[in-house]
């Protein structure tokens, strides 16, 4: 029964029931405190967050960004540096002080822009509780205005050239940064996901090319209004500008003046995260997912090996990009994406039109690939397939048919699943792999068929839409959800979004944390001493029904929480 805890189990907590509270719930013996919130200043000369105005472009550019997502900590010079993605903004919240939640001034739009990107901030314990260190020399904001460079096969290609950058080698900024990944050499990989939603067209009757359409570019943006203040987001004037987004970007947190690099060898798509593994032979393998209904799972393998003194630029620029083909018999293979296999003119084109390249080799359409995490104790890799309402119903817009089968076994799949694969011979560079499903999420109180979920889903631990995945150092798989929180009908009894722990050996899954109303739980890392777990709470109150974390009438604010054990023990 829920709450029971066997002496032998590998989870150091008792399962908590789900709920619909506007609060963080953790098991007995644990506590959760807020570490940093959207709008908290990173420097002492910046005003505190103002609930009435919700800040300005100037304050936001020097404060913690909105909608926290992927994150990692780094030990640098005896300090702990937290690097965090700020994925996007909810216009109803960031402009909630305006009529109808719409931007009224250019500064409103610029404030929204400055809430995107990456926040880098030193953190430290004070009386045992971790908080941010204002004015640290490592503190930095990276925004859609920050200078970066292109590297890898696509750098300098005609499709990347614009009026502002006739060389196709430099770029301004990064946005919609979703998941992340650490490299073994101490840098941070941030992943550009829904970059398309920021472009719009001022020209009457403008239509996207098929190439842009496959990436979701259309004449209207998603309400951010960036083209109003920055012409490069007007795709009818600057049609190559969208080709310059959708990459994995490498950031060096040790040098606050370093220029981030867009690593085009890792392909262009709606990148979720970047899970980096050092293979037995020293080559770097990076697993990558494209979060869109009917898009694909990818792998990158470096040509060189990671060794002391290695040229780490080359490890991310020179290598081979592959896409996954899953067979119904539980096997699969990685197919290289090259001019030879795809018929494309160059590797640069493969790296810019990666979705089209993958379609040409017959890649398997997936149920929205979200985070990927590799088990530190075994050569196996887990990927969240969050849901897919279109599976078996209609093809991916601009892409391929999406038949039911393989690791995507349900039509109109609104619960999601986690697939795992084991590379042949324990070699992450092998062509072949075996796969199975770690869990099929579902609701056993509502359904008795496959929509009730796999055997390891019960009335006590059920959830929908797995998204964040992160193994801890003990080999426990933490699962975060970004799903339907209506707590009704198909989702009856599933409550708010949550975080669970999974045992990769037994398949057992147990709920650890429930988030506040209308949030998504995403982003997970630890302080270097492993006594504090940092968990991201994104978009609380995205539909207007939360005042978390401050309560009362406060504006809801995305935040990172610090979870500790009351006995001060290790946590993951
Ligand atoms: Fe930003 Fe696919 O989640
Ligand atoms: Ca996600
Ligand atoms: Ca999601
Ligand atoms: Ca999200």
Image (cartoon, helix red, strand yellow):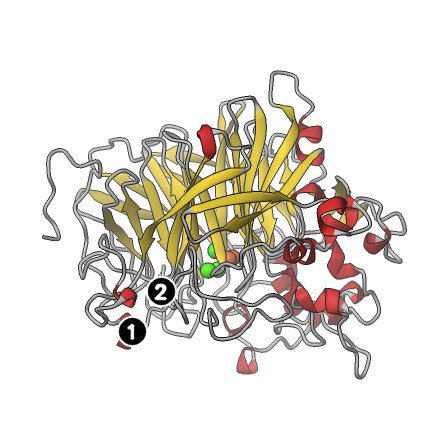
Q: Is residue 393 left or right of residue 167?
A: left
Label 2 crowd (10 A; few <14 / some 14-19 / many >=20): many
Residue 176 to residue 492: above or below: above
Label located before the other in sequence (2 or 1)? 2
Which residue bears the numbered disc 2? 415
Secondary structure under tag 1 reads helix
Instruction: Work out which residue is located at the far top of the displayed protein and give it.
Output: 308
Secondary structure under tag 2 reads loop
Quick check: marks 2 and 1 in contact, CB under 8 Å? yes
Q: Residue at x 35, y 64 (%)?
A: 415
Nearest the eye: 10 or 129? 10
Q: Residue at x 80, y 66 (%)?
A: 231
Which residue bears the numbered disc 1? 490
Q: Position of residue 149 (x, y in %)?
A: 76, 43
Q: Is residue 551 left or right of residue 276?
A: left
Q: Position of residue 35 (x, y in %)?
A: 40, 46
Q: Is residue 470 left or right of residue 63?
A: left
Residue 258 to residue 266: above or below: above
For label 2, being within 8 Å of ligand 3 is answered no
Q: Position of residue 162 (x, y in %)?
A: 86, 57
Q: Position of residue 351 (x, y in %)?
A: 72, 48
Label 1 crowd (10 A; few <14 / some 14-19 / many >=20): many
Residue 7 to residue 346: above or below: above
For residue 523, say whether it is visible: no
């Amino acid at each position: 029964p829920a709450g029971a805890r066997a002496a032998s189990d590998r989870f150091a907590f008792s399962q908590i029931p789900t709920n619909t509270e506007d609060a963080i719930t953790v098991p007995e013996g644990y506590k959760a405190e807020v570490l940093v919130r959207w709008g908290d200043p990173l420097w002492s000369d910046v005003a505190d967050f103002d609930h009435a105005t919700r800040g300005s472009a100037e304050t936001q550019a020097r404060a913690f960004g909105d909608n926290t997502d992927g994150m990692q900590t780094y030990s640098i010079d005896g300090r702990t540096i937290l690097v965090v993605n700020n994925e996007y903004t909810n216009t109803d919240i960031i402009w909630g002080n305006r009529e109808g939640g719409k931007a009224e001034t250019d500064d409103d739009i610029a404030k929204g822009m400055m809430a995107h990107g990456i926040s880098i901030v030193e953190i430290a314990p004070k009386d045992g509780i971790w908080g941010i260190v204002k004015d640290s020399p490592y503190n930095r904001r990276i925004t859609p205005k920050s200078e970066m460079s292109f590297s890898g096969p696509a750098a300098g290609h005609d499709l990347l050239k614009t009026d502002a950058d006739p060389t196709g080698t430099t770029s301004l900024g990064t946005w919609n940064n979703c998941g992340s990944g650490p490299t073994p050499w101490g840098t941070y990989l941030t992943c550009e996901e829904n970059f398309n939603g920021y472009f719009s067209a001022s020209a009457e009757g403008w239509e996207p090319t098929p190439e842009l359409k496959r990436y979701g570019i259309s004449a209207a943006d998603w309400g951010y209004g960036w083209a109003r203040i920055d012409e490069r987001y007007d795709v009818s004037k600057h049609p190559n500008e969208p080709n310059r987004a959708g990459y994995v970007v490498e950031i060096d947190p040790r040098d606050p003046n370093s220029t981030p690099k867009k690593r085009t060898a890792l392909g262009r798509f709606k990148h979720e995260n970047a899970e980096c593994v050092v293979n037995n032979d020293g080559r770097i393998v990076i697993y990558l997912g494209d979060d869109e209904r009917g898009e694909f799972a990818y792998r990158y393998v470096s040509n060189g090996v990671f060794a002391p003194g290695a040229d780490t630029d080359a490890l991310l620029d020179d290598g081979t990009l592959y896409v996954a083909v899953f067979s119904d018999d539980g096997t699969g293979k990685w197919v290289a994406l090259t001019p030879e296999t795809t018929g494309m003119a160059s590797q640069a084109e493969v790296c810019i039109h990666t979705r089209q390249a993958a379609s040409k080799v017959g890649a398997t359409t997936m149920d929205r690939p979200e985070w990927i995490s590799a088990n530190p104790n075994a050569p196996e890799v887990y990927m969240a397939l969050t849901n897919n309402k279109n599976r078996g119903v209609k093809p991916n817009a601009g892409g391929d048919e999406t038949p039911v089968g393989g690791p995507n076994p349900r039509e109109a799949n609104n619960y999601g699943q986690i697939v795992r694969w084991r590379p042949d011979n324990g070699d992450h560079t092998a062509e072949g792999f075996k796969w199975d499903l770690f869990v099929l999420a579902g609701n056993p109180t509502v359904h008795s068929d496959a929509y009730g979920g796999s055997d390891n889903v019960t009335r006590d631990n059920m959830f929908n839409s797995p998204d964040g995945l992160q193994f801890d150092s003990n080999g426990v798989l933490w699962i975060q959800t970004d799903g339907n929180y209506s707590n009704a009908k198909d989702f009856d009894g599933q409550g708010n979004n949550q975080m669970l722990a999974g045992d990769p050996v037994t398949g057992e899954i147990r709920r650890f944390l429930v988030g506040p109303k209308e949030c998504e739980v995403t982003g997970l890392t630890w302080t270097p001493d492993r006594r504090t777990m940092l968990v991201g709470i994104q978009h609380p109150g995205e539909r207007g029904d939360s005042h978390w974390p401050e309560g009362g009438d406060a504006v809801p604010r995305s935040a990172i929480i610090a979870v500790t054990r009351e006995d001060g023990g290790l946590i993951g």
